[in-house]
Image (cartoon, grey):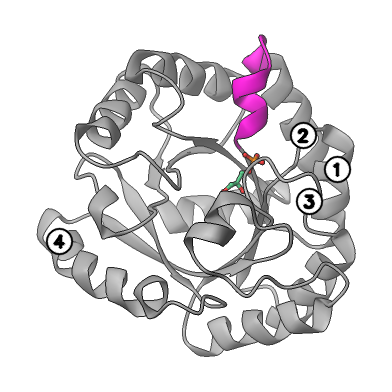
Amino acid sequence: MSVENQLNEIVTAHGAVHLTLIDPDNQSPDMAGTMAAMAAEGGTDAIMIGGSTGVGGNIVDNTVKAIKKQTDLPTILFPANAGGVSKHVDAIFFMSLLNSRDVNYVTTNQAIGAPMIRKIGIEPISMAYILIEPGGTVGWMGDARLIPQNKPALAVAYALAGKYLGMHYIYLEAGSGADRNVPPVMVGVVKHAVGEETKVVVGGGIRDAKTAESLVKAGADMIVTGTIVEQVNDVRSKIAELVKAIKSK
Ligand code: 1GP
C-alpha cells in the first residue's frame, strides 16, 4: 500500500495522524535513528526527514538509512530543495510553496527534482505548502508572503488554490520552533473549505498535548512535531502524550 493510503487510512480509523520530523542537521545519523525508534514506541505514525539549512550531500542519506535501520515506520522526505532528495526514503512530500515570491520554491526545484524521483521510484505525495506567521527559517529561506495569523480567509484562498491544482495534502506551517502555532480557527476554516478528501497537515510550534488536541478538534488531519523531540529527554513519553491527545479511537 502507498504511504499516502496508509496515512489516510489512519486518519479514517483513528481520527488523526502524528508525524515526527527529524532535521538531519541537528544530530548524528545514529542519534536520529534512536530518536525515530523512541518516537515509534511512543506511537508516531511516520518519520519525516528534512530541514531548511545544512541538509545537502550524504547527511540526508545517512540519516534516512540510520532511521530505517531502527524502525519499520514509513519515511517521508520533507525537502528544502531539489538537492536534498534521498533514494532511501519511502515517499516524498512533493510540495509547492504556494505563497512564495520566489518561483524556485513554487515550481523550479520541483522540475529539477521530478525526473530524479521518477528514476529512483519514490512515492510523491502532492502537497500545497502554505506558510503562516511567524514562518521561521523556512519563511525567510522560502521568501514567503507570510499569511497573518488573523487572516484565515487568506489561508482558505491558498488552500483552495492548492486543492484545485490537484494537491492532495495542504500543509499549514508556522515554521519550526515557532513561538505561535497556526491558530485552530484558521485550521477549522481551511478544513471546512477543502473537505474530507483533502488532508490538512499542521505544524510549527506544537509542543503539548492540549495544543495538538485543539488543532485536531478544529479539523487538522495530521500533526507534525519536530523541535520538541530534540528538547525532551524522554522522547517516547512525549510522543505518547501527543499521540494520545489526537487519536479518537
Ligand atoms: C516544521 O512544522 C514543522 O516544518 C515542525 O515544527 O519543529 O516547531 O515542531 P516544530
Would you name the residue on which mark 1 appears?
211
CB contact under 8 Å: marks 1 and 3: yes
Q: Secondary structure at mark 1?
A: helix
Determine the CA span between mark 4 and mark 2. 35 Å
Sequence-wise, which precedes: disc 1 or disc 4?
Answer: 4
Q: Which residues are magenta?
A: 226-236
Q: Residue at image x 45%, y 57%?
A: 4
Residue found at the far top of this picture: 233
Q: Position of residue 12 (x, y in %)?
A: 65, 56
Q: Secondary structure at mark 4?
A: helix
Which of 25/140 is in front? 140
- Residue density around tag 3, few if under 14, some if 14–19, many if 20 or more, within 10 Å: many
Position of residue 36 relative to residue 107, above or below, is above
First in sequence, mark 4 or 2: give its number. 4
The CA span between labels 1 and 4 is 38 Å
Q: CA distance from mark 4 to mark 3?
A: 34 Å
Residue behind mark 4: 116
Is the CB atom of the residue marked by disc 2 within 8 angstroms of ligand 1's nearest atom? yes
Q: Which residue is mark 3?
A: 181
Determine the CA span between mark 1 and mark 2. Answer: 7 Å
In primary-sequence order, the first of circles 1 and 3 is 3
Q: CA distance from mark 1 to mark 3?
A: 8 Å
Q: Is residue 235 a member of the stretch shown in magenta?
A: yes
Residue in front for this viewpoint, 117 or 243? 117
Inspect the image, locate mark 1, and give the three-letter code of the amino acid beneath it: Thr
